[in-house]
Image (spheres, rainbow, N blue to C red):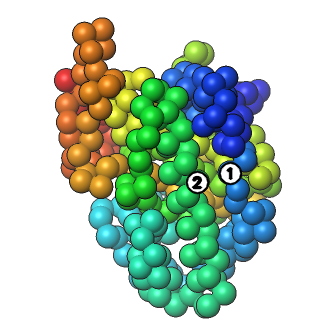
Amino acid sequence: MAVEIPVIDLRLAGAAPEESARLRAACERLGCFRVTGHGVPGGLLAEMKAAVRALFDLPDDAKRRNADVIPGSGYVAPSAANPLYEAFGLLDAAAPADVDAFCARLDAPPHLRETVKAYAEKMHDVIVDVAGVLASSLGLAEHSFKDWPCQFRINRYNYTQDTVGSSGVQTHTDSGFLTVLQEDECVGGLEVLDPATCEYVPVDPVAGSFLVNIGDVGTAWSNGRLHNVKHRVRCVAPVPRISVAMFLLAPKDDRVSAPEAFVDADHPRRYREFNYDDYRRLRLSTGERAGEALARLAA
């Protein structure tokens, strides 16, 4: 049975108190919600999906030119741990020069470049907007996320008849502050852990909306108020599945610490200040990608 994911209208969340309260409750309890009213045209979403399919049709040597900027930020080939999964990565998706460099390395044709650039610009606006209304819902008004670095992750799951029922990606939390995901409207398989039942439940895709997940930085930055949702992907159909994720990572200076507004006598600081790049490296080196690494940083 699919879990009921709260649907938040981004046009109302910054102005209507009841919508703001629903947003806060969703992030504190489940760690994810669905957003509508985001302003990204349906035509651009369709064009981006076509661009994604074209990128994955490139030969392997071309894909590998999408090199890491920081560990884990570039092309990810199928591996022993995730044999059905491959992905492109782009850091910093908020910087037009970096988007241009990503397209140039892959020798993307002009129409594809324009699609990726337009999509990156729109999605950066969305993710900054989402983070801002979320901060406001916690009582931190006018907090800007505009200069926080962002990462694109363009995913394909190479499913076949023989892989139905198997894992697409292992259980994990996202390392950054929050993630905005454009799902495959035709192929499901995403599952989130419901803290109330400790069971994984499927998340059905909804056309025209984005799914938003809270990550590890979001939990630390909020002093534990926001829930970093554990999730995984299962193969549910014998056809390829694609998705596009935009990650809002961490403050520009790389230092993650809860603002003083979230710390008082009743709510002591739960996590030590840490550098996000060091935290990413810790997750990669230990393989602790389902929230365990964050527990090492308890105050």
Residue 30 coordinates in the image, percent (x, y)? 57, 26
Q: Is residue 137 above or below residue 114?
A: above
Circle number at residue 38: 1
Q: Determine the residue positioned at 75% across, 63% down.
A: 41
211 vs 107, left or right, is: right
Circle number at residue 134: none
Residue 73 coordinates in the image, percent (x, y)? 38, 64
Please tell me which of labels 2 and 1 falls first in the chain: 1
Residue occupied by mark 2: 126
- Whether pointer 2 and pointer 1 mark residues with C-beta atoms closer than 8 Å, the reply is yes
21 vs 226, left or right, is: right
- Classify mark 2: residues with Cα within 10 Å, few (<14), some (14-19) or many (20+): many
Question: Is residue 33 visible in the rendered structure shown here?
Answer: no
Question: Is residue 268 visible in the rendered structure shown here?
Answer: yes
Tell me the kind of residue under disc 2.
Val
Q: Is residue 272 above or below residue 105?
A: above
